[in-house]
Image (spheres, rainbow, N blue to C red):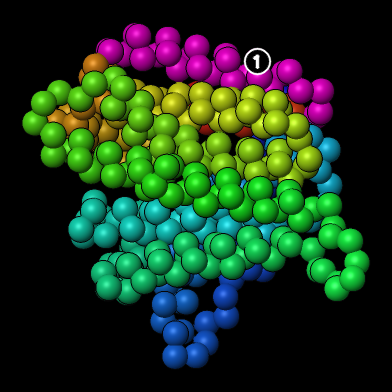
Amino acid sequence: MEETIFRQELQKRTAAIEELLKEYLPAEEGYQKTVIEAMNYSLMAGGKRLRPMLMQETYRMLGGRDDIIEPFMAAIEMIHTYSLVHDDLPAMDNDEYRRGRKTTWSVYGDGMGVLAGDGLLNYAFETAFRAFPAYAVGKPVDENYPRVAAALNILARKAGIYGMIGGQNADIEAEEQTTPLTTEQILFIHANKTAALIQSAMTIGATLAGATDEEIAALELCAYNVGIAFQIQDDILDVIGDSKELGKATGSDAQNHKQTYVTLHGLEESGREVERLTEEAVAVLDGFSGEHEFLKELLLHLVHRTK
């Protein structure tokens, strides 16, 4: 796919996801109006919308055509957003700006920032549950019921203590660790803090499309590779990236004495590992017969990004 065509398609899909998210925003009313405003402020702050896009593209690749995927697309973006809201809090990274505008806690206060993150996490599951088809007493259960139930299980586990939260826990403790980190620790953090939600997106898309266990396992591995490569590339860009293009200061890892994959293995070996992981991920996708040209380009774009 030509770069110009890919960027046009990326822009079109991103805009469509933005409109989808608006449909699922809770109404800003009642005595809980402020927390809902803070939730909506956070969710509509922009971003790549990567996770819902990966979910939708995987679903389509495996033959999915219904709108049953849409509540899960909105839900996973809510979960990703809640993690950013909490990351920015004074007790965590203490960031006042994200994507060029004030962070949620710096606008609404840190207490409301906590509640906004909590609200997004809970509302994500309220939203995902909308995927269950209407059930009439006395009639057979729709075939999508077990698929939706399985998808909910994936969403919960990958976002929780055996996924993203577990990775965040390890990352916090790593910052306080006085001894050098091991490669195993760094890969655990990357696998859970970053790759877990990418795995969630792609395997939920596959599950709702009716994929086999073998296909789901293959896509889970593909997503793992993409998540690890994405994060190693992030470490590389912190060393060699252009701060203007990145939109953030570079060299922060070194200034904060943060140990990364690059500090352990060097730029050259890290670059080779990004290439190896990416090639394996692409090979997995090419094993599927469904249309996946855009999905493949999207993964390559994410891993080989310069910002």
- Residue drawn at (23%, 53%), measured in percent from left and top? 92
Depth check, front residue: 236 or 186: 186
- Magenta stretch secondary structure, dominant: helix
Other residues around mark 1 within 10 Å, as few (<14) / some (14–19) / many (≥20): few
Q: Residue 241 location, x and y as percent?
A: 34, 27
Q: Secondary structure under badge 1? A: helix
Q: Residue 19 location, x and y as percent?
A: 67, 61
- Is residue 266 in the magenta section? yes
The residue indicated by pointer 1 is 283
Depth check, front residue: 138 or 222: 138
> In the displayed image of the protein, which residue is found farthest to the front?
138
Q: Residue 106 location, x and y as percent?
A: 28, 67
User: Which image quarter holds the C terminus?
Assistant: top left
- Residue drawn at (43%, 49%), measured in percent from left and top? 160
State which region is magenta. Answer: 265-291
- Is residue 286 in the magenta section? yes
